[in-house]
Image: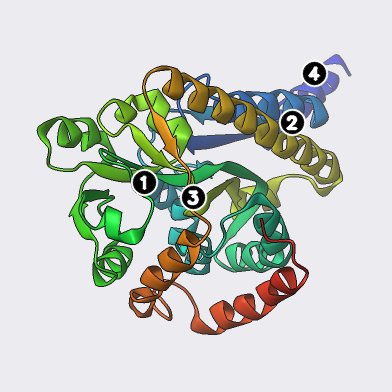
Amino acid sequence: MIKKTSLLGLWILTTLTAAAITIKIGSVAPARSPWDIALKKMNKEWVRITKGQVQLKIYPGEIAGNEGDVIRKMRIGILGGGVFTSIGLSKIYPDINLLNVPFLITSQEKLDYALKWLKPVFEEGLEEKGFKILAWSMAGWIHIFSKEPVLYPRDLKKHKLSFSTGEPLWEQAWKKSGYRVIPNDLKDMMMALQSGMVDSFYLTPLVTASAQYFAFAPNMCSLKIAPVVGGIVVTKRVWDRIPDPYKPQMMQVMKDIEAELNLEREKLTREAIQTMKENGMVINQAPEDSLAKWTAEAAKGLDEVIGKAFSEKLYREFLDYLKGFESAGDER
């Protein structure tokens, strides 16, 4: 009897151990950043909810590679999840590139309105590709930083604009709009600025401040080019292994994390801008008539991306949807 009981206990222990799921998460966000802290909270709460059956192993700061590398590793099962910007997400589901159209969404109010329509579309598209989004996060707004003040397109056209490599369609779109684009990896940005190879770029204030790029491009245009929206994603293969009874509580944790990330990002962005101002950066206020001019210039290159970087049908439907926001007079 004792022998049978021992064997039964061993079988139960072995079964529970085998059922435990460790999800390996790759992230480009540095260790101790808000996104890294969010992943650690996610792990703690998921372990609690599932009584240890689900836990995370986190690889921050590009330990697992860049966004493209993480996606490839997720597809072949080396990683179970990742933290991505909209650029990374668009490599899974290209229509997310809609968020990258310059000067299409230039206020938080308009972004909130847009995401009510876009989130369900994007989430369905990601699931069809085999991925499950757990939380959306806003990483900030892209601004133009430059050596000399930039208020209108004609000002930027005098500069050498750094442009991320690996995005040939968007590169052609900017070139067709008349800008002098210099392909350049972000890791090489400081060297390019120091050498004079480039003298302008577009990034979020958080990245610009943390990397000290503003020392060589101390002018920031107040106009927002586009939002940087990202998310925490796992493969559906991994998500489907998790017992269904746990999932509602796990997703509630992700909603809480989503809200906390957005609040923390706003706080850190304000602090980053203040720090840069205290160290010589100048924010140049875009004139009221400038947005129309920027939008018109951007439109010259859009045929390079419409129907190629994202669906033309979805783009037209999205523009129709945005008319509701504009007609309501809520644009800021």
- Mark 1 or mark 2: which is in front? 1
Give the Cα distance between marks 4 and 2: 31 Å
Q: Residues within 10 Å of mark 2 (few under 14, many from 20)?
A: many
Image coordinates of residue 43 in percent, x first then y, are: 67, 27
Q: Are marks 1 and 2 in contact (CB under 8 Å)?
A: no
Q: Quadrant of residue 62?
A: top left
73 relative to 267 in the view: left or right: left
Measuring 53% from the left and 35% from the top, which residue is drawn there?
24
Q: Amino acid at mark 3?
A: Leu
Q: Amino acid at mark 2?
A: Trp
184, above or below 7, in the image: below
Disc 2 target residue: 46
Q: Are marks 4 and 1 in contact (CB under 8 Å)?
A: no
The mark nearer the N terminus, 1 or 3, is: 1
Image quarter in which the C terminus is found? bottom right
Q: Residues within 10 Å of mark 4 (few under 14, many from 20)?
A: few
Q: Are marks 1 and 3 in contact (CB under 8 Å)?
A: no
Q: Amino acid at mark 4?
A: Ser
The mark nearer the N terminus, 3 or 2, is: 2
Give the Cα distance between marks 1 and 3: 11 Å
In the drawing, what numbered circle is on residue 202? 1
Secondary structure category for the residue under label 3: loop
Q: How many marks?
A: 4
Image quarter in which the N terminus is found? top right
The one nearer the camera, 124 or 23, is: 124
Disc 3 target residue: 223
- Mark 3 or mark 2: which is in front? 3
In the drawing, what numbered circle is on residue 6? 4
Colour scheme of the rendered structure: rainbow
- Mark 4 or mark 3: which is in front? 3
Secondary structure category for the residue under label 2: helix
Secondary structure category for the residue under label 4: helix
